Image (tube, rainbow, N blue to C red):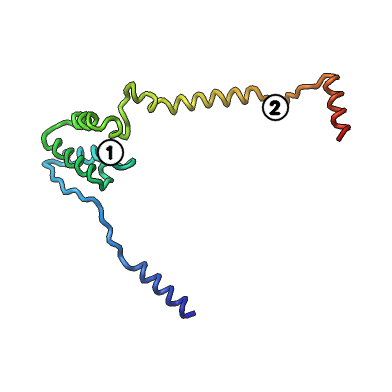
Amino acid sequence: MKAKLLLLWVFLGLLSVSVPVYSQVDTFEFDTDEQHQRFRKLSNELRCPMCQNTNLTGSTGGVAEDLRREIHRMIMDGMTDQEIEQFMFERYGDFIFYRPRLRAETILLWFGPLAFLLIGGYVIFNIVKKSKPGEVESLDEEEQQRLDELLEHK
């Protein structure tokens, strides 16, 4: 009984110990709130090239840190969002965008799921159409005799 009580106290003690958590904190300064909003929007919409499926805001990688610094510099230099996105595209390709641009190379990415859905619907429609319930094919006399013979031998 004492061992269980001691174990409970140790468990509760471990729960009360705070664990330090470290996160990425950027200390970029902006002239206007609009610049800060643009920075946040771009950082949230661009993917970290080093991390798997993490935006620049959520990534703690060195590449993401460099890209955030680069975005800050370009905003402060007066570049538009389109110019910044074009710069990132030229450097990293479509991977940098969570929503890739509609181009010949990304047409399957954009419309592939719809095509697969339509093809799947067509296949299911034909399967259902061919298997009409209640429709039983009758046997001719020769087939019925053969079936009776097979059933008698069991």
Q: Residues within 10 Å of mark 2 (few under 14, many from 20)?
A: few
Residue at point 84%, 27% (across, down): 147
Give the numbered dot on residue 113: none
Measured in 3D between alpha carbons, the distance from the residue under mark 1 to the one under mark 2, in whole angstroms, is 54 Å
Q: Is residue 99 above or below residue 52?
A: above
Residue at point 23%, 50% (across, down): 24
Residue at point 32%, 23% (across, down): 103
Pick out the residue farthest to the bottom: 2
Residue indicated by mark 1: 49
Q: Measured from the top left, where is residue 29 in percent x and y?
A: 13, 45
Q: Which part of the image, by quadrant, shows the C terminus?
A: top right
Of the image marks 1 and 2, the number of the one nearer the N terminus: 1
Residue indicated by mark 2: 133
Q: Is residue 66 above or below residue 125?
A: below
Please tell me whether mark 2 sits on a helix, a strand or a loop.
loop
Foreground residue among 88 and 114 = 88
Three-letter amino acid code at disc 2? Answer: Pro
Please tell me whether mark 1 sits on a helix, a strand or a loop.
loop
Which quadrant of the figure has residue 13?
bottom left
How many marks do you count on the picture?
2
- Left or right for 103, reference 27: right
Three-letter amino acid code at disc 1? Answer: Pro
- Left or right for 118, reference 125: left
Q: Residues within 10 Å of mark 1 (few under 14, many from 20)?
A: some
Q: Measured from the top left, where is residue 125 in percent x and y?
A: 58, 24
- Left or right for 86, reference 129: left
Q: Measured from the top left, where is residue 102 in percent x and y?
A: 32, 24
